Amino acid sequence: MNNMQERSEEQILSRLLELENEGGAERRVQLTDERFLALIHDPDNGRSYVLKHGLDDTEGAEIPAESEFYEYATRDEAEQAFNQLTNEFGSGGEVVEVDSTEAIGDSEAAGAEIIDQYSADEGDPLMVDEEEK
């Protein structure tokens, strides 16, 4: 019996979305209709993938509808497929931005969002002016 269990399609999609959210996509293209195409290498299994998905409106609770992936044995094969798909989407007018970082990490809720280091209101009692010290 094999020590490694085969992962289900849903488990692979979940892993790929996790890698992408963590900035693990080698290349990423934003498509029309809030869709994305990503080239991802999974360091855990050494496989490379091309992932196509929409926006995650569930903050990671569900895999976005119409998500699909293509698995390749080598990075070169995956990169060639990624380039071909990008060209096909581009010739169809569906590429919005190449090397997009749009919506990366949107489903992460692991910490406070830092807006701006100078964004505190002057009326904030925790803000102490240097001159008042």
Image: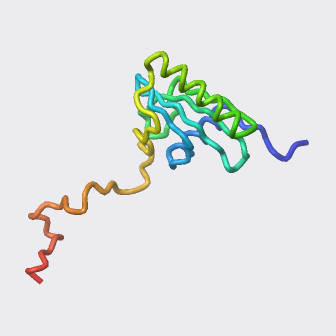
x, y percent for residue 53: 52, 29
Position of 84 with respect to 76 (left or right) is left
Which residue lies at the image location 70% right of the left edge and 50% below the top edge? Answer: 44
x, y percent for residue 57: 41, 33
x, y percent for residue 40: 60, 41
Q: Work out which quarter of the rendered image holds the N terminus and state it.
A: top right
Position of 69 with respect to 87 (left or right) is right
Question: Residue at the bottom extreme?
Answer: 133
Name which quarter of the figure residue 123 lies in: bottom left
x, y percent for residue 13: 61, 35
Q: In the image shown, does 48 or 17 lie closer to the viewer?
A: 48
Position of 34 with respect to 13 (left or right) is left
Which residue lies at the image location 48% right of the left edge and 31% below the top edge? Answer: 36
Question: Residue at the top extreme?
Answer: 92
Position of 110 with respect to 68 (left or right) is left
Q: Work out which quarter of the rendered image holds the C terminus and state it.
A: bottom left
Name which quarter of the figure residue 12 lies in: top right
Q: In the image shown, does 31 or 3 lie closer to the viewer?
A: 31
Which residue lies at the image location 67% right of the left edge and 31% below the top edge? Answer: 9
Which residue lies at the image location 54% right of the left edge and 26% below the top edge? Answer: 86
